[in-house]
Image (cartoon, grey):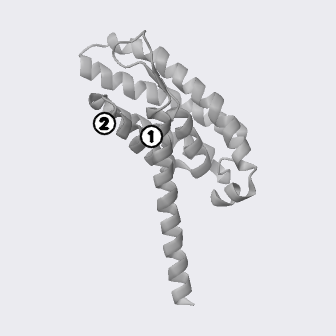
Amino acid sequence: MQKTNTLSKQRGKTTDLVIQAMLVALVFISTIFLNIKLPIASNGGLVHLGTAMLFIASILFGPKKGAIAGAVGMGLFDLVGGWLVWAPITIISRALQGYIVGKIAWSNGSRGDSIAKNIIATIVSIPVMVGVYYIGEAIMFSSFIMPLASIPGDLVQNGIGIIIAIPVCMVLKKIPYFASITR
């Protein structure tokens, strides 16, 4: 009995690790391959689908996996995509954003099942993400004015993320096999 219990725990940890790695990879791929640099902002202004994947990861798998997927996936993009100076800001803002979305979506035993909570979670996370980038850019550029140019792109990126993530999560939650993984 003890051996079976230990083996079961090891499989659970391995499955957790594999899921986390896949979520990081999905956020990274969604960020690196599906992005558009906005001409309105010279100091950033990148819209990508990594935010949608961050929302999906957080809603389906909770705050810890969402925070790690967002921070590592988008942080890696900054490191390899030519946005190196942005990496610390990205890691902090996306970890917080993923955690907030997951925490709200999974509050009171919901586990990402409530569409209303999921929408609220994504919306509540936006000011945190925008605020962290604003403060980071203000420090980076020694200006409280320059970071304002990034806000429209941040809002568009998050809006697109919500529009994509909420329906995708609704569909994925209906798939029996997938629903069993998130339980």
Q: Tell which of 94 and 124 is nearer to you.
A: 94
Question: Which residue appears at 56% of the width and 45% of the height?
Answer: 57
Q: Secondary structure at mark 1?
A: helix
Amino acid type, residue under disc 2 in the picture: Leu
Q: Which residue of the protein is positioned furthest toward the bottom in this rendering?
A: 1
Q: Is residue 48 above or below residue 166?
A: above
Quadrant of residue 41 in the image? top left
**Label 1 CA crowd tier, 10 Å (few <14, some 14–19, many 20+):** many
Q: Secondary structure at mark 2?
A: helix
Q: Tell which of 128 and 49 is nearer to you.
A: 49
Q: Which residue of the protein is positioned furthest toward the front in this rendering?
A: 33
Question: Which residue appears at 54% of the width and 19% of the height?
Answer: 156
Amino acid type, residue under disc 1 in the picture: Phe
Q: Tell which of 102 and 158 is nearer to you.
A: 158
Q: Is residue 168 above or below residue 161?
A: below
Q: CA distance from mark 1 to mark 2?
A: 11 Å
- Quadrant of the image for the C terminus? bottom right
**Label 2 CA crowd tier, 10 Å (few <14, some 14–19, many 20+):** some
Q: Which mark, by number, is residue 28? A: 1
- The residue singled out by tag 2 in the image is 79
